[in-house]
Amino acid sequence: MAESSEKMVRKQFLVPPSTVKRLERLATAQGTSASEIVRQAIRSYDARDIETMESAELMEVVSVRLKEAIRSTRHAERTVSRTLRAISSAERSIGSAER
């Protein structure tokens, strides 16, 4: 748990829904709050770790991030396609109404 001698400050961060779900799963699995999981992650973070990572670890990190990017891109493509179909349909409706 957080150090009781330190005053807590409320901060808000924007994260994707998949990260929120993962955070909630981690908190439930560890029997703690999502806030505590974030505090633990921040305390354990060291930007220099990337320099000392083994190839296999680094590849795993890249793989996870790439999968997230692909999933996000596919979602965006589906959204754009649906929007374009709706626009096309609306244009056809307008065109037939003008005749």
Image (cartoon, rainbow, N blue to C red):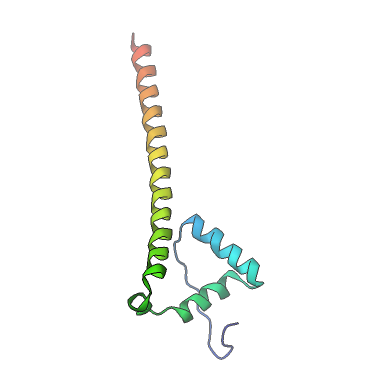
Q: Is residue 69 above or below residue 1?
A: above
Q: How many marks?
A: 0
Q: Position of residue 41 (x, y in %)?
A: 49, 75
Quadrant of residue 81 in the image? Answer: top left
Q: Nearer the viewer, residue 50 or 85?
A: 50
Residue 62 is left or right of residue 3, and the answer is left
Residue at point 52%, 77% (across, down) = 39
Most distant residue in the top direction: 99
Q: Position of residue 28 (x, y in %)?
A: 65, 66
Residue at point 33%, 8% (across, down) = 99
Q: Nearer the viewer, residue 76 or 60?
A: 60
Quadrant of residue 50 in the image? Answer: bottom left
Residue at point 52%, 73% (across, down) = 38
Q: Position of residue 74 (x, y in %)?
A: 41, 43
Most distant residue in the right direction: 31
Most distant residue in the bottom direction: 5
Q: Is residue 78 above or below residue 93?
A: below
Q: Nearer the viewer, residue 40 or 88?
A: 40
Q: Is residue 6 above or below residue 35?
A: below
Q: Nearer the viewer, residue 88 or 58?
A: 58
Quadrant of residue 59 in the image? Answer: bottom left
Q: Position of residue 7 (x, y in %)?
A: 53, 85
